[in-house]
Image (cartoon, rainbow, N blue to C red):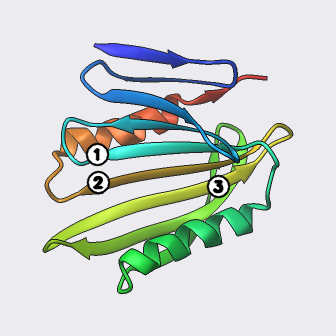
Amino acid sequence: MATLYDDEVLQFQYPENWQVERQDTEEGWTVSVQSPGTAFLLISFYTERPEVQDILQTALQAMQQDYPELEAEPVSEKWNHHATKGYDITFFSLDTVNQCQLRALRTAKASILILSQHSTFDSATHIAVLDAIRVSMQMKK
């Protein structure tokens, strides 16, 4: 059964057996959505509205420090009526293939980074749920 996350800026649906946590940060706040497996999704809001390219470079460089052999392919797509830029990333960790989708956009209220990640240990259902969560996300005006 789906549960609704709903705050002053964002709402989305997620399975009731997934864990959701919101944390305030120096730059704004982050919502994490964790599956019962290793799949997860992070949504970070930056209230100072840094440039999309700066957010993406910072995130990609952080991942490259941990996984120097990662492969990152630049992508652009629409999300919630907004143009996003980002990367589709593949890397190995503990003999496991991991895939990550990194997307960023800038609105009148904030710059936003959306990161979803799963590994070969995750079921096809978990991967589909990550996509469904992203599709269900709505920014409030």
The percent coordinates of residue 3 (x first, y second) are 38, 14
Q: Please state which of residues 24 and 14 is positioned toward the viewer in this rendering.
A: 24
Say which residue label 2 marks: 118
Q: Please state which of residues 38 and 76 is positioned toward the viewer in this rendering.
A: 38
Alpha carbon distance from label 1 to label 3: 20 Å
Q: Residue furthest front?
A: 26
What residue appears at the point 39 percent right and 61 percent down from the top-left corner? 100
Looking at the image, is mark 1 or mark 3 earlier in the sequence?
3
- Picture mark count: 3
Disc 3 packing (10 Å; few <14; some 14–19; many ≥20) = many
Say which residue label 3 marks: 104
What residue appears at the point 13 percent right and 54 percent down from the top-left corner? 121
Label pair 1/2, CB-CB below 8 angstroms: yes
Q: Amino acid at mark 3?
A: Ala
Q: Amino acid at mark 1?
A: Ile
Disc 1 packing (10 Å; few <14; some 14–19; many ≥20) = some
What residue appears at the point 72 percent right and 68 percent down from the top-left corner? 53
Q: Quadrant of the C terminus?
A: top right
Say which residue label 1 marks: 127
The percent coordinates of residue 6 (x first, y second) are 56, 16
